Every structure is written in C-alpha cells, then in structure tokens.
Image: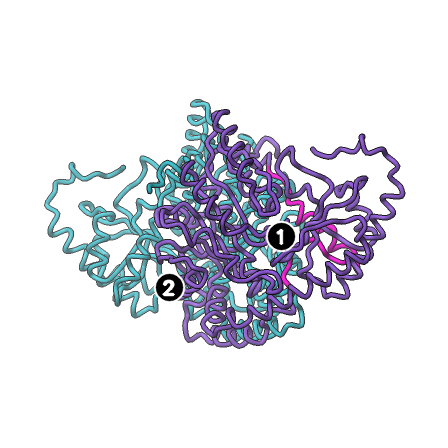
Chain colours: A purple, B cyan
C-alpha cells in the first residue's frame, strides 16, 4: 500500500536535514575525516566526574531520579540556570525558564507556539539548518536577511521587513545566533545587538536569540563581554533566549534551556507536555550535579583553549593547503570556519568527490533558505577531530578541490551561482 | 507587553494536561496519597544493575556514549527492538523502527505527520489524555467512539466514521490502546482486534496502536496470548505500533519506540530531526545494555506479580470502603482502575475535597473529548504508592465521597451528566 495520501501537508514538505544526510553518508566510509557535523570533542567530556555522579544518582536513595519529572524541568536545575543566566547578565525568573530536550526542541517549541502557516520568520543568510527546518515544518515562510562582517545587515533587515509586510505577511520574529554563528562563526557587535532590539521594539516583533556557543569565545581575539546576550538588555520582554549544555558538558544528555517572558513560557510548557512530557530525568540530574560541583564553570577555560587550538590548527592547514583559493573570516569562538571556495567550485557538486577522497563538510546551500543560496561556500567544523586528523582532512579537501578545478573547464558564466 | 497577538492558532487552543495539573497541585500537599499520576513503582527499578551499566558506559572507552546520535536511534537498540517485537508476534524490519523520546513523542510524531487542521482522528471514549492533546494540537478534530466491556464498540465506530465522512471530514486513523487501556484498564479481545483491522482496511484508514502496558498482564485473569498486538496480524501495513520502556524499566530514561511501515517511518524520522535530533544517547545505551543482560525479560514476572498484588489490594480496599457506591471492571493488567461514582457525585467537583482530605485521582472528564464526558468517573492508579499508603488513600477518598454526598441535596435532574 502507499502512504502519500495519508501525509499531512506539513509532512509532505519536510526535508531531510542536509547536515544529518552528509553525516550519515560519512559514517559508512571508513577512515573519513568528519569536518561536517558540529560535534563537540569527546576529549573534553568529564567522564570521571559524570561516572561518579551517575553512580551516586543511581543508588536508589532518591527514587525520583528515574521517575517521570515535571515538564518545566528539575527544580534545582532551574535554580542553577537562573545563576547561569545571571552570569551572562540576564536576570531571569523561575517563571521564565523551561528545560528543553536539547535546544532543537526549543526551536521547535518557538515554531509551534509562534508560527502559523504563511507567517514569516526572518533568519540570517546563511543560518542554522536545524532552525530553518523547525520553523519551516509549521508551514511558515522563512525569509533570509543578509549579513555583513558584523552579522545581520540592518538595512537589509529593514528592507525585508517592509517588503514582507507590503506583501501582507505577518513577520513574527527574527532568529539570530549572535555568538559565533552557525555556520559563519560571526560575532555580532554590542552596538548592533542594541540596534537589533530597538528594531524589534519599533516593528513590534520578537527576537529568538540562540546561544549555544557564547561560553566558547577564543581569548586571543575575544572576551566574555563581547558575548553579552541581547536578552541581557531586554526589560520589555522581546527576546526568547535559548542555550544548551551540549557544547560545554555533552550533547548525549539532550539538556538545554530557554528563557522567555513568563506568559510565553507557560505556552511552551503546555506544548511540551504533549510533545515529550519532560527532558530526560536522569540526564537533568547529572547536568545539575555537574553544575553544583562547579564542573561547568571550572572547565570553561580548558574548553576555550581546546577549541581555540583547533581553530588555529585548521586555519594553519587551510592556509598551507588552500591558502591561494579559500577565504574565510577568522572565527572568534565556536566550532566553525565558513569558507568561500574559488570560482569554478560548486560545493554541492564537490561533496561527492570530497567524500570519495575521505573528507566531509557541510555544503553551504544547507544553510540558505532562498535565492541567496551560494554554492561557493562550505562549513568546516574544527571542533570534533583530533588535530592530526583534521590536518589530514584539509589535505584531502585540497586534493578534491584541485581535481575538481582541473576537470571543470566550464566557463564561469554557466556556473549556477545561486538557486 | 502582551503576547496574545504573537501566538499561533495552535498555541491559543492548547490546553494544560489535566493529569499534570492535578499532579502539580498534589505535589504541594504534604502527605497526599497520589492515586492520580500513572507512575510506575520505583521499588521495581533495577537500581543496582543500572548503576553498574552507567558505570561502564561512562568509562570513556566509547566516546559516542555522550555524543550526538542518529535520529533513528542507537543501532544495537534497534536490533534489540526487532527481537522484542518478534517476541510479541510482530516481524519488524530495521526500516520500520524508530526510537522515540518517550511514547508521548511517538504520538506527537503521528499527529504531525498524519494530521492536518480539520482532519479527524478517532479515539476511544474515554482515551489517554496525552494522546488527545498531541492530536488536538495540530488543529485536528478528535472524535470519540464508545467502548463496551470488550473495548471499541464496532457499531459506534461504523456510525461515527460514516457521520464524519458525510460531514466532509477526512478520517485519518483510529487511536486505540488494546492492552489495559488508559484510563479504563480494558483489554480488547483477539476477535475484536481482527475486526478492527478489517474495518481499517475496508475504510482505508490507519490504526495507531499504543501498547505501553501489554507486558504487564495479571496472570490470575490473563495470559500473554491475550495481549497479541493488532500489528502482529498486519501484513498490509495499516498499523502504527508504539511501545515504551517507561513502565518496564523506568520512565526517567524517556526511551520508547514505534514500528510503522517504512515509508511512514522515514517521515517520522525527518520530522524528529527538527524536533529534538535524537532521544537521549546515554539513556538509549543504558536501556540497550539492560535488554542485552536479559534484565527486561527476566524481570517481567516480578513486575506482573507486583502490580497484580497492588490491583488486588486496591480492589479489596475499594470494596471495603466504597463497595456500596463505586463500581468498576476488574483490570486484567496495567496500572488503573476506572471507577464509576454514585449519582450525586461530580468527580470534577469532588477533586478539591479529595485533595483537602489528602488523596488525588484523575477526573474522568480529562479523558473525554466531546459530549461523552461523564463526570461520574475517575481514574485511580494503583501502580505507584506502597500498599499501605494506597489503602490510606482509598479511606480518605471514602471520607470525601461521604461528605460530598451528605452535602449535595441537589436533585439528580439538575446534575450535569455530560458536557
């Protein structure tokens, strides 16, 4: 029997994640160097401490550690998150906090509670593919706003907003990743953050601020004050803030959180009741204990140094192997280098050759939503592989690029620069 | 600022879970006996074994234990689930399996992939409140079908289907809990299961079969063969089957699964990518190891005996304390007694007095979707409290009922029997 006739409209339009598709292909190739998925480095996980914590939690002393838990989240973890947010300059109340099953769930909750089919969500061009999918799955239209070296281009933001409204569409929010954006690695300046909030107030829209990487700035070129959330200067309640333990503790726990105005948080909670009841109950306790023991805070300098060293290694390799052809803006934190390939390279076409040569990346087109999709770009993650493997991966990428350039004698006019 | 104007249509109609609301009230009352939430008994959790498993998994030997994992689920767990399903008479393929973040997520995936606003999902009257919420949150209409002592009434099913189609609505699926239904505890007979599948084929609709309790039959009045899933006799692929480790291992892991025709499973997977990426990665491994060690299967006889003893104790208490006023069908498995209260009792009104007297239950109306909502019913869970506490709870319930009956001199004609 066939099932097309049974699918909802939403389901018929859902698209497989480009990142996960490439990751899945990659897992079948032995010896592949994964520069695709933005996995944190497992060398940074606090195995010994987690083991001791789990050992204690599973003693059976507190039976609720494996029971159903409250949808809002484990109460002591919520108190801890209030402290975490205070450390980031955000005064959050208990009524504004919700623990989510990874930040991906926060994005899905935002989509379901705020977007109707036909509504418009604005995203940076390019933007995190998982957010685009979550928003698009509601039937909303996702419209891109160009970025300059300092993130969102305010003129383009004004133009896009005006155009969408003129076309009769409701613009609901701007989704933005101000700290070391996925995929570009860009850091939005503090002045622009202020102006984004002014724009939101003036236009009466919300800002969805996604901040998985903020704690992972690189001390050679950035400092903590550069990462101050937009939410920290939001007394009015225009900003929905998301963050996660996936990059600082471990993604396998699937524990993240959101801070939003209390009335919206109530709606997110009610939606979550029918979505998965609660985040992992044991997972939340492990994360809470790790925080309580000071593990999260004490390890941040090590994490920053670890990823900074990997960024340096990747930049060095790229300069050595592809310095004459690739260009990028040095990331000041996070996991990614957003590389521009030379004319004649279509990263959607290159990927098959790259995988054959033993290296994977994420094609730039995975992060675009519309006519802006340039196929000259790729996201290279430096977070996961050990440095020697990463160097090997860049070498393989260079081989693939050289082969591709040698074979493509197509004149540049016929190159499809956008789709 | 106010947020009503920012809410999606779906969000404006979402309702708080009645079960979770009562549970939340209950948690604030010291000494309350919780007969409301259907929590498994923590005495049955394999603390020592889980501790040993977690200890090993967190050694750091296998770094992927805390990394992002595949959306489909941990591959060895999927193989284990194929065996579990074979034990239940279902030949499942890898391509038909998806690990979900609790069965609640399976219900949400069903809703999002199969229901458009205005579509009809059929449910038993009464039915599991969490399923009703998940389906309703898509904007679909949830329509109830009456049950007799053997579950779904086939005549009413035919009538409702006919009526909904005559009104121009698309009937997408029937949601059914054949084994020890939540809330009624009813077990659907094998013959009726066969006829439900014939009905689905004839009418070209799907069946969503939710089976959290099937392994927990009571050997004094039932046997394993009574619980054979509808999915076991579904060569055509009409049935989407959901089950969970929440009642047999522990709910805190949030690990469950679904078995559906491969083309639908692909859609569920793509939807899940944008919902939470994957179920808890460490959790899935703990559950897999527990299965691998034979823990799941070897403990089932103990679990059956445990809950059977609690059912017996609750029935005995109810007969002793309220035998003259309450009636119920003896459950042959599962967690619940569905009790009919005497004329003059409105369980929605009684709940406040019951909580004051120190006992909570779930009001019958939480499980109804439409005009069938009778306020003469309540769900009493015998699964969670120790037997002496449960007995105390029933005593308190009896006090509340007697007080309520003494105070309500309202003639029965003015009693709102339905809403």
Residue at 14% of width from left, 55% of height from top? B403
User: In the displayed image of the protein, which residue is found farthest to the front?
Assistant: A191
Q: How far is disc 2 from disc 1 in space, using C-alphas?
A: 50 Å
Residue B384: image tag: 2
Q: Do discs 2 and 1 belong to a common subunit? A: no
Residue at 26% of width from left, 66% of height from top? B30
**Mark 1 highlights which residue?**
A185
Residue A183 screen position, x and y as percent: 63, 49
Which range is magenta? A14-42
Residue B340 screen position, x and y as percent: 27, 49
Residue closest to the eye, B254 or B351: B254
Residue at 27% of width from left, 66% of height from top? B391
Q: Is residue B177 left or right of residue A145?
A: left
Tell me the element at label 2: loop
Q: Is residue B337 above or below residue A419?
A: below
How dense is the environment of label 1, judged by Cα within 10 Å: few (below 14), some, or many (20 and up)? many
Residue B21: image tag: none
* Quarter of the figure with residue A180: bottom right
Chain letter of disc 1 in the image: A
Chain letter of disc 2 in the image: B
Residue closest to the eye, B391 or A303: A303
């Amino acid at each position: 029997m066939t099932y097309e006739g049974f699918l909802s409209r939403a389901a018929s339009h859902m698209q497989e994640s480009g990142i996960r598709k490439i990751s899945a292909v990659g897992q079948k190739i032995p010896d592949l160097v994964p520069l695709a998925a933005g996995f944190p480095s497992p060398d940074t996980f606090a195995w010994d401490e987690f083991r001791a914590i789990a050992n204690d939690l599973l003693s059976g002393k507190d039976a609720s550690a494996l029971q159903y838990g409250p949808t809002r989240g484990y109460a002591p973890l919520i108190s801890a998150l209030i402290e975490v947010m205070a450390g980031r300059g955000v005064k959050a109340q208990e009524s504004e906090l919700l623990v989510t099953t990874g930040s991906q769930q926060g994005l899905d909750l935002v989509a379901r509670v705020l977007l109707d089919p036909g509504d418009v969500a604005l995203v940076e061009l390019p933007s995190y593919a998982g957010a685009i999918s979550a928003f698009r799955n509601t039937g909303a239209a996702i419209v891109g706003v160009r970025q300059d070296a300092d993130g969102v281009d305010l003129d383009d933001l004004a133009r896009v907003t005006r155009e969408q409204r003129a076309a009769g569409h409701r613009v609901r929010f701007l989704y933005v990743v101000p700290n070391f954006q996925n995929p570009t690695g860009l850091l939005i300046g503090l002045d622009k953050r202020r102006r984004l909030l002014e724009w939101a107030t003036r236009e009466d829209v919300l800002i969805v601020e996604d901040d998985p990487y903020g704690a992972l700035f690189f001390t050679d070129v950035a400092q903590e004050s550069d990462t101050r959330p937009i939410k920290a200067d939001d007394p009015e309640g225009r900003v929905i803030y998301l963050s996660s333990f996936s990059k600082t503790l471990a993604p396998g726990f699937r524990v993240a959180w959101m801070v939003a105005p209390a009335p919206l948080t109530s709606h997110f909670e009610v939606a979550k009741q029918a979505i998965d009841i609660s985040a992992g109950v044991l997972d939340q306790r492990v994360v809470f204990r790790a925080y309580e023991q000071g593990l999260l805070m004490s390890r941040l300098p090590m994490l920053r140094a670890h990823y900074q060293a990997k960024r340096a290694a990747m930049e060095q390799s790229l300069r050595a192997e592809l310095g004459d052809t690739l260009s990028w803006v040095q990331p000041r934190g996070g996991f990614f280098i957003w590389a521009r390939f030379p004319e004649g390279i279509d990263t959607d076409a290159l990927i098959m050759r790259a995988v054959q040569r033993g290296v994977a990346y994420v094609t730039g087109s995975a992060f675009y939503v519309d006519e802006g999709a340039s196929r000259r770009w790729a996201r290279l993650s430096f977070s996961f592989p050990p440095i020697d493997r990463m160097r090997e991966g860049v070498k393989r990428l260079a081989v693939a690029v050289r082969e591709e350039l040698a074979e493509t004698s197509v004149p540049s006019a016929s190159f499809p620069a956008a789709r």
